[in-house]
Amino acid sequence: GALVYQYPRRTICKSGTSMRMECQAVGFQATSVAWYRQSPQKTFELIALSTVNSAIKYEQNFTQEKFPISHPNLSFSSMTVLNAYLEDRGLYLCGALTGTNERLFFGHGTKLSVL
Amino acid sequence: QQQVRQSPQSLTVWEGGTTVLTCSYEDSTFNYFPWYQQFPGEGPALLISILSVSDKKEDGRFTTFFNKREKKLSLHIIDSQPGDSATYFCAASRNSAGNKLTFGIGTRVLVRP
């Protein structure tokens, strides 16, 4: 079956520092990768959608300057949280879209804590 | 404005009983509705999904119903098991690809033995 691995599972960073997280699709080619954030007490917020050979589309309230994303091939994507602060805490989820049945499969997420 | 409303926020069911979760939505252009199951510390796993051209989809103990006229959908879990205890999210998108999902706030389900 389709597997999406995210690394690291958990991370703690000091306020004002940056943190990079990775997403790897295993067993399938991810035509698109969607990055979501699940904040405490909130549901999922879409940060950006990255499709191979297309520009990365950021949602309102999220910017490339704050959450730069790299999507170099059909199986890997990474996102960095720059200058992290308390409001950036949460579970960051990578959702990979398969080209065959067009379903979104999520990884375990990277839980970001900010001190 | 919350585009996808989900209820209840939490629910306790006895083992063997039927769990019923409901969602409603506003945007009539939504046409794809997946349900995700999330255990603590894990990412959400796709459980079952339905397109707006259907009114029912069944997968084992899980059935999702869709009412286009009322803009409502529901998830039924029959013969609920303690292992079904998790948070369930409904979601919606405007295309079958589901790559821009709008999620509900989730329902925390506890199945007691």
Image (cartoon, coloured by chain):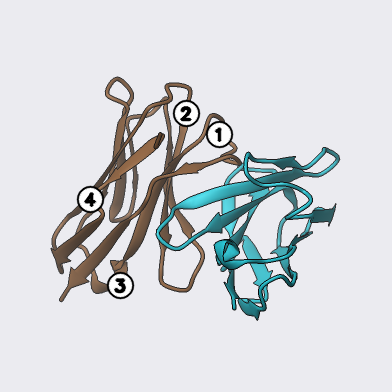
Chain colours: A cyan, B brown
Label 2 vs 3, first from the N-terminus = 2
Q: Which of A108 and B79 is in front in this view?
A: A108
The residue drawn where x is 35% and y is 56% is B88
Same chain for the residues at labels 2 and 3, yes or no? yes
Q: Is residue A4 left or right of residue B13?
A: right
Disc 3 is placed on an element classified as helix
Label 2 vs 1, first from the N-terminus = 2
Q: How far apart are marks 2 and 3 (CA)?
A: 30 Å
Instruction: For mark 4, name the chain.
Output: B
Residue matched to label 3: B83
Residue matched to label 2: B31
Disc 4 is placed on an element classified as loop
Label 2 vs 4, first from the N-terminus = 4
> Do tag 2 and tag 1 residues touch (Cβ < 8 Å)?
yes
- Name the image quarter holding residue B6: top left
The residue drawn where x is 75% and y is 63% is A82
Residue B66 in view, yes or no:
no
**Relative image position of residue A52 (x, y in whole percent):** 81, 44
Q: Nearer the viewer, residue A112 or B32?
A: A112
Residue type, mark 1 in image: Ser
Question: Which dot marks residue B96?
Answer: 1
Disc 2 is placed on an element classified as loop
Residue B30 in view, yes or no:
yes
Q: Nearer the viewer, residue B4 or A63?
A: A63
